[in-house]
Amino acid sequence: MLKITKICLAPFATITAQRSIALTATRAIDQKWRASRGLPENPNAFGPLTNLPDYTYLDGRPTPLGANQKRRLLKQQEIATRIVELSGELEFAKQRHERLKENAESEKQRLIRSKLKPKGHLLLKK
């Protein structure tokens, strides 16, 4: 809430109140340095701290997946199935396009053959 503390009674005086809000966030990580070394933008998004288990058993038993590891694994599986599905659709679309082109070409050739028939004395020479 804005509060005006001083009133000016001059005939052309204007009172303005200004409120500033920062709309951009600062980046705490040097992105150019990370990009020049081929590292991801977010250091916590990928790496041994996020991909490996939190602990291991000394006798070699497999450790259970963490909640975030399981979520990432399920998300990657969904992405993989979507990629396979879309690549199949793409292959189908390519085959259909080729088939339509061949059908159009054969229809064009059929029309040309049906239009160009010998007439008159050329027809009688056969």
Image (cartoon, grey):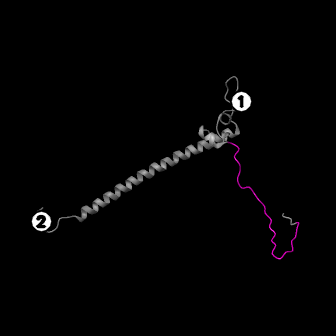
Q: Give the SS element for disc 2.
A: helix
Image quadrant in which the C terminus is located: bottom left
Sequence-first disc among 2 and 1:
1
Residue appearing at x 13%, y 65% in the figure = 122
**Magenta part of the protein: which range?**
5-29
Amino acid type of the residue that numbered disc 1 sits on in the rendered structure = Tyr
Which amino acid is tagged 2? Leu
Q: Which mark is residue 55?
A: 1
Q: Nearer the viewer, residue 48 or 16?
A: 16
Please give the label number shown on residue 28: none
Drawn side of residue 24 relative to residue 11, left or right: left
Q: Position of residue 4 (x, y in %)?
A: 86, 66
Q: Quadrant of the N terminus?
A: bottom right
SS at mark 1 in the image? loop
Discs 2/1, front: 1
Q: Quarter-wise, where is residue 12 in the image?
A: bottom right
Kindly identify which residue carries mark 2: 124
Q: Position of residue 49 (x, y in %)?
A: 68, 34
| 13 left or right, relative to 73 | right
Q: Residue at x 69, y 46 (%)?
A: 27
* Position above or below: 6 against 74: below
Position above or below: 5 against 36: below
